[in-house]
Amino acid sequence: MYARRKRMLRLDSMRDEAGSAVAEFVMVVSLLTFLTLMVMQLALALHIRNTVLDAAAEGARFATLADSSLPAGAQRTRDLITTAVGATYASDVVARYGESAGYPSVEVRVIAPLPLMGLLGAPRGLEVIAHAAVESLE
């Protein structure tokens, strides 16, 4: 009698949890999907930041060459950004002379959108500045 009652209680408790595996699966999969998409979005934002920063550095180096100019460096930066990630990210590029660590240098500043959801995001959320020492023939 005792064994039968114990078995009935066990069956009743199993019936109470019927369908819980499906609910747990849906919750876990949705959480993992969300986390995966967030990591991918972070990777995209870092990729765009690094690409824009590298293009700005290359534009600054290009502008410091003895036979080059500031507009040429800014245009080089725009061309590299447009080729890599699109023209939207190359709309605000400024090159100017400045000083870095006490030496004359060229500064290239790029203000671009910060991607928050896919490629959409804050319009002026990303600002990078690159410096390069000015070369001279002296």
Image (spheres, rainbow, N blue to C red):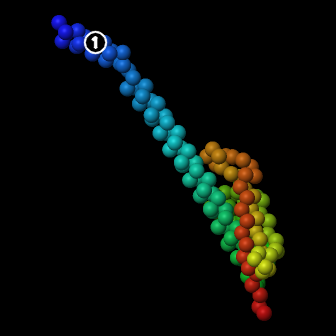
Residue drawn at 77 percent across, 71 percent down: 107
Q: Position of residue 135 (x, y in %)?
A: 75, 84
The single residue placed furthest to the front in the displayed view is 2
Picture quarter with the N terminus? top left
Q: Position of residue 18 (x, y in %)?
A: 35, 18
Q: What residue is disc 1 on? A: 9
Q: Relative to 3, is 31 above or below?
A: below
Residue drawn at 78 percent across, 80 percent down: 103
Residue drawn at 36 percent across, 19 percent down: 17
Q: Position of residue 23 (x, y in %)?
A: 43, 25
Picture quarter with the C terminus? bottom right
Q: Relative to 40, is 100 above or below?
A: below
Q: Is residue 98 visible?
A: yes
Q: Relative to 82, is 103 above or below?
A: below
Q: Quadrant of residue 117?
A: top right
Q: Amino acid at mark 1?
A: Leu
Mark 1: secondary structure: helix
Is residue 71 shown left or right of residue 14?
Answer: right
Label tally: 1
Q: Relative to 23, is 31 above or below?
A: below
Q: Is residue 68 visible?
A: no
The single residue placed furthest to the top in the displayed view is 1
| Closest to the observer, 12 or 120 | 12
The single residue placed furthest to the bottom in the displayed view is 138
The crowd level at tag 1 (other Cα within 10 Å; few <14, some 14-19, many 20+) is few
Is residue 65 shown left or right of residue 42?
Answer: right
Residue drawn at 52 percent across, 42 percent down: 35
Q: Position of residue 16 (x, y in %)?
A: 36, 15
